[in-house]
Image (spheres, rainbow, N blue to C red):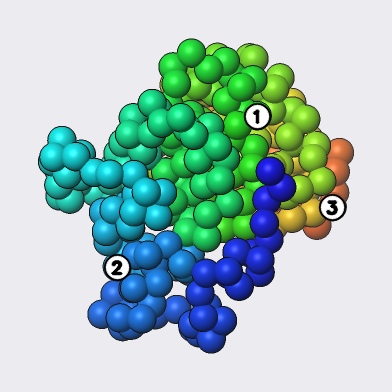
Amino acid sequence: MPRKSKAQRSSLSVNPSLAASKPARRRSEVSPETLAALETGKLATRNLVEWLAMDQLRLFTHLLDDLKLETTPELEQELESLRSVGVMQKSWGLGSLLARFITRHPRHPVILEELTTHPSDAVRIWTMTAIQSPTKLTLSQRLTAIRPFAADEHFGVRECAWMVVRPALVNDLPKSIHRLLPWAKHQDANLRRFAIESIRPCGVWCAHAPVLKAEPELALPILEQLRSDEARYVQLSVANWLNDSSKSQPEFVTSLCHRWLKESPTKETQWITHHAQRTLRKQGVGS
């Protein structure tokens, strides 16, 4: 099924004036109309404030109603158990619950395919989690399944895309880096960014990768490919990768940055190497 554009999804689901309005800067400023649109799946969150203000459990219940799927006492109990957990744990929990709830449904694959283009970013995040939940998926299958979400127009969906597949990538880094290298060469900056962000040594909101902290050179094929990337979104990810590495392997980072500046004296490489050494400069190391 071809993915609908943002304009197509919005025009089918929400008042254009609401979608065009400025998002609130504080949770208390999120309007009742905006909350209603978020919690009925008609509007994607536009910043972290809206994400935190939205009741994900209410949205999940509304989604089940839309899909004409009946709740059970067991489901309601599990939903309630998620009410007090953190926002990311809640999101992963709802994705796992969605997978379990619809697995035996006769339209199971069709439902998941339809939900990949749902107007709500939260629903798309649950959907990617549900798709990734089978333990028998190969690394190749996981990457194929996550690709639409890694290229999603919504920043939150893209961020969750690398997080949900990262454990499988870190579990077999040589194979992962081989599989991700074509992504690092792709014309879509979102996919290039995914290739490096998903294997950061430390990362954000995820477990560290001890192998990469000890052997950062394993990621050189991807780092070299992106050392002069034109997109600031990708540049920042490469710089953050190297900044992560500088905390455990400072000599690797200073040596690599020095070589890059000699071999690739572009403004993009200069920006990356400068930003990559920010922690080292605070420690009085590097230039």
Residue at 51% from the left image edge and 74% from the top image edge = 14
Q: Closest to the observer: 158 or 9? A: 9
Residue 284 x/y as whole percent: 50, 47
Q: Nearer the viewer, residue 173 or 36?
A: 36
* Residue at numbered disc 3: 266
Amino acid carrying label 1: it is Thr
Q: Would you name the residue on which mark 2 appears?
A: 53
Along the viewing direction, whichever of 147 and 265 lies nearer the viewer: 147
Q: Quadrant of residue 175?
A: top right
Whether residue 97 is visible here, answered yes or no, is: yes
The image position of residue 110, as x and y in percent, is: 55, 37
Which type of secondary structure does the marked residue at label 2 adopt?
Answer: helix
Q: Dot 1 lies on which element? A: helix
Which of labels 3 and 1 is toward the front? Answer: 1
For marks 3 and 2, give the one nearer the viewer: 2
Image spot of residue 7 (x, y percent): 66, 69
The answer to the question of whether label 3 and label 2 lie on touching residues, with beta carbons closer than 8 A, is no
Judged left or right of residue 243, residue 24 is left
Mark positioned earlier in the residue sequence (3 or 1): 1
How far apart marks 2 and 1 lie (CA) works out to: 32 Å
Asked if 61 appears above or below 211 in the picture, the reply is below
Residue of label 1: 144
| Mark 1 crowdedness (10 Å alpha carbons): few <14, some 14-19, many ≥20 | few
* Distance of label 3 from label 1 (alpha carbons): 33 Å
**Left or right placement of residue 39 versus residue 43 in this view:** left
Q: Which residue shows up at 57% across the image and 25% down it?
A: 142
Q: Earlier in the sequence, mark 2 or mark 1?
A: 2
Q: Earlier in the sequence, mark 3 or mark 2?
A: 2
Q: Marks 3 and 2, Cα distance to the nearest angstrom?
A: 43 Å
Residue kind at label 2, given as amino acid type: Ala
